[in-house]
Amino acid sequence: MRMKRILVGSMAFFALIVLSGCGEPLELTVTPIKNVDKVMVTEQSQVDVYCQTGICQFNLASNQATSVTVNMHYNDTRSFNKIEGVSITGKLGSSVNMADENTFSLDVSSDSEPLKIQVVDYYRN
């Protein structure tokens, strides 16, 4: 009887450890590919991308499924005027939502390859 209690108790403890391991913090990885001057993760699921030419490419990956908001800028004082297009290559390419003229959001999954994103500003330099 005592052996059963130890076995049940150790199984419950193991289940608790496994379930608590799922709570790791969100980590976004943004890798510049073309014409990206700098990238800043400003909040847990928000990214600022700086691109002086108005046309740029970058990869975006996450360690867990989340919705990411991307703000596009030319430099520290000027945001994109009007995003003409966002092209996504990867598993969730159809999940882009335009928030305003220089901001869009998309869903990122942890089980996929990094998403390759190309953004074009209509009024680019």
Image (cartoon, helix red, strand yellow):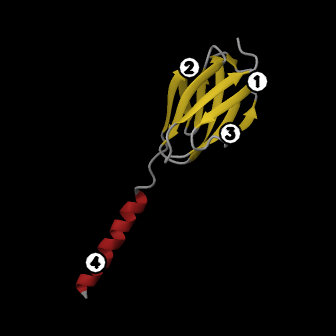
Q: CA distance from mark 1 to mark 3?
A: 15 Å
Q: Which mark is residue 7?
A: 4
Residue type, numbered disc 3: Val
Residue type, numbered disc 1: Lys
Q: Which mark is residue 96?
A: 3
Residue type, numbered disc 2: Val
Q: Which residue is mark 1?
A: 82
Residue type, numbered disc 4: Leu
Question: Residue 81's spot in the image, x, y percent?
Answer: 75, 20
Question: Residue 109's spot in the image, x, y percent?
Answer: 54, 46
Up the image or down, 20 lies above or below 1; here it is: above
Q: Which residue is mark 2?
A: 36
**Hey, which residue is sitting farthest bottom in the picture?**
1
What residue sits 76% from the left and 24% below the top?
82
Circle nearer the N terminus (3, 4): 4
Q: Quadrant of the C terminus?
A: top right
Q: CA distance from mark 3 to mark 4?
A: 49 Å
For the residue labelled by badge 2, is the local secondary structure a helix, a strand or a loop?
A: loop
Circle nearer the N terminus (4, 1): 4
Mark 3 nearby-residue class (10 Å; few <14, some 14–19, many ≥20): some
The residue closer to the viewer here, 36 or 17, is 36
For the residue labelled by badge 4, is the local secondary structure a helix, a strand or a loop?
A: helix
